[in-house]
Every structure is written in C-alpha cells, then in structure tokens.
Image (tube, rainbow, N blue to C red):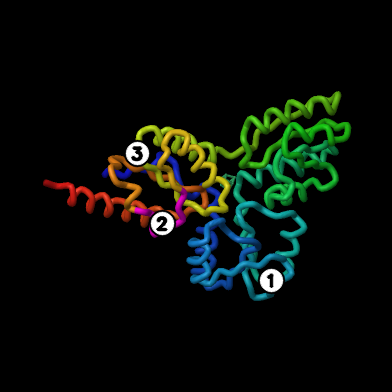
C-alpha cells in the first residue's frame, strides 16, 4: 500500500510562525500566556500546555511578570495597548496577512472613508480588524447583507483572510450600489486554505482512501473532508492515528493524506508512519 501526501498540507505560514514565536519565548524562560487558544488543534494545545503555555480569555488576566501572546488572528489596538500596559512582554504573532488588512482599514479610516469588510462579524480576526476603523467599518457576511449598509463614502472593500473568493467578489460588486463614489476593492484573501483544497482535490481522484488530519471543530479541516469525499468515498477526518481502522484499508492500494492548517507536522508524521506500518503488515499477509 502506497501512502501519498498532498502537495500542500498542514500548518499555514501564519500558524507556523505563531508557534515558533511562542517556542522562542518558552526557551527564553518566559511564563507564556496566549490570549485565546493559540491554535485550533487539541493535541498541539496539549503539547504547548506541557511546555508551560496557558491560555487567558481577557487581557485583564495577564500578570506583570508574564509574557502575553497575540495569536495569528490579531486583536484590536485597544486590546494590544492593554496587554502592553500589563504584561512584562508582548509577543505579537498576528499573521502578516492579517496585519495588512488591519493597516488598510486604519489608513482608509484616517482618510475618513468607509470600510466594508466581508467576513464573519464574530470571528476574532474580524473583531480585531474592525478595531482599526471602529467608526468607519462595517462587517457583512456576504452579498445578502449589503442592503443593511448606509450610503457609503469612498468605500474600501476588503475581506476576512479565509473566506471564499466568490463570496468576496459578489459582495464587493453589490457594495457599488451603496455609493456614487469610486469603490476600492482589495482582495485580502489568503491562499493557504484554497491551496490545501486544490492539492487535496488533485490527489483525491488518484487514491482509494484518504485521511484528513485535523480537529473536528476546525472548519478548514471539515472543508477538506468535503473536497476529498467528492472524489474518494473512503475519506475520513481523524485527529490522530489511533482513529484509523485497518479494516477500512483492506483492498486499498493507494492512500492519500492531508491535514488542516492547524495540524502540526509531528501529528502528520505519526499518521503516515502508522499507515505505512499497516500497509507493510497487509503486504506481508498477502505474500505467497
Ligand atoms: S490562514 Fe493565511 S491569513 Fe490565516 S494565519 Fe494562516 S497564513 Fe495567515
């Protein structure tokens, strides 16, 4: 049985950077506390907890001798200031792609322009970006919510980094009905999610079974499962190798593996090794 990895899988650039920054702080001997779960992966959170990383839900919980971590989603400038005032040190792991959206929103607001952000209003990334233009920005989920917007002044339209491009462009086009001014549309979608889906799609047609490694609550992992199921009926979303049932692999010649953007490499390596061991056992038992 051959085990094939998709061309793009696992940690995206922003998550990998955030974990590296946290590990650096741990090695410097800091008491590290992340504002919100650093990553949507239970096993990696457990590993980090073992290294001493704890999570806080409010900036007020940070102590003077502790290092506060801003995760990849970013925070509002207000929260950042609060952390800087209270913590011994702040590790700002905001993904540079998110920082770009924050800066674009802040600049448009400084020019007294409206900002329309297409995304989920309750997503932490969106809450953070909105904080950079609190009196000028509106968050809408999609085209259907454009009607709720007021008449707009020289609007800038940007997006949450992880939404679908069709959702963004359809909404951005509809925003034009809310102004007689020119509309500036800047696509701020990050390609990490799409790249992982494209790579999974490309592999799904070539394998007999597919394992997607990721948390059950990780939306990008659940979407990867959907993409794989379109072409490979034996596609499974698993968190660890312990969930693999060897019976599912009977008669399988090629098995695909991919992982969501929050899945660490060590978990992926464990799954691949486990699959290879099952494959060897099966090949041996079939040998004449
Ligand atoms: S998905 Fe994209 S924007 Fe979000 S953290 Fe990863 S690299 Fe950054």
> Element type at marker 2?
helix
Q: Is mark 1 within 8 Å of ligand 1?
A: no
**Which is nearer the eye, 152 or 93?**
152
Q: Earlier in the sequence, mark 3 or mark 1?
A: 1
Residue 238 within the segment the image draws in magenta = yes
Give the left or right position of residue 133, taking residue 32 as reference: right
Instruction: Tell me if label 3 and label 1 are in contact, CB under 8 Å.
Output: no
Q: Quadrant of the N terminus?
A: top left
Q: Is residue 92 above or below residue 33?
A: above
Report the front residue among 64 and 166. 166
Front position among marks 3 and 1: 3
The mark that comes first in sequence, 2 or 3, is 3
The residue identified by callout 1 is 62
Q: Nearer the viewer, residue 86 or 176?
A: 176
Q: Which residue is painted at 60% across and 49% down in the image?
A: 95
Q: Earlier in the sequence, mark 1 or mark 2?
A: 1
Circle 3 residues within 10 Å: few <14, some 14–19, many ≥20: some
Q: CA distance from mark 1 to mark 2?
A: 37 Å
Nearest to the observer: residue 160 or residue 201: 201
Q: Position of residue 37 (x, y in %)?
A: 60, 61
Residue tagged by mark 3?
208
* Element type where label 3 sits in the image: loop
For residue 257: magenta?
Answer: no
Q: Position of residue 66 (x, y in %)?
A: 63, 72
**Which residue is disc 2 drawn over?**
243
């Amino acid at each position: 049985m051959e085990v094939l990895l998709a061309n793009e899988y696992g940690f995206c650039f922003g998550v990998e950077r955030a974990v590296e920054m946290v590990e650096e702080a741990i090695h410097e001997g800091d008491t590290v506390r992340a504002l919100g779960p650093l990553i949507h992966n239970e096993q990696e959170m457990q590993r980090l907890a073992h290294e001493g990383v704890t999570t806080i839900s409010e900036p007020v919980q940070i102590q003077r001798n502790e290092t506060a971590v801003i995760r990849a989603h970013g925070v509002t400038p207000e929260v950042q200031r609060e952390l800087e005032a209270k913590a011994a040190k702040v590790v700002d792991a905001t993904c540079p792609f998110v920082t770009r959206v924050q800066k674009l929103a802040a600049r448009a607001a400084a020019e007294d322009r409206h900002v329309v952000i297409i995304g989920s209003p309750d997503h932490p990334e969106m809450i953070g970006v909105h904080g950079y233009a609190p009196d000028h920005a509106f968050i809408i989920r999609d085209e259907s919510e454009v009607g709720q917007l007021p008449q707009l002044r020289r609007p800038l339209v940007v997006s949450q980094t992880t939404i679908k491009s069709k959702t963004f462009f359809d909404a951005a086009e509809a925003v034009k009905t809310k102004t007689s001014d020119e509309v500036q549309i800047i696509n701020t979608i990050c390609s990490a999610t799409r790249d992982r889906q494209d790579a999974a799609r490309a592999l799904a047609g070539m394998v007999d079974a597919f394992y997607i490694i990721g948390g059950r609550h990780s939306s990008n992992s659940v979407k990867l499962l959907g993409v794989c199921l379109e072409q490979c009926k034996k596609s499974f979303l698993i968190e660890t190798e312990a969930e693999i049932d060897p019976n599912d692999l009977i008669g399988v010649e090629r098995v695909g593996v991919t992982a969501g953007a929050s899945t660490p490499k060590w978990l992926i390596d464990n799954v691949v090794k486990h699959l290879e061991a099952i494959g060897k056992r099966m090949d041996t038992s079939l040998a004449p």
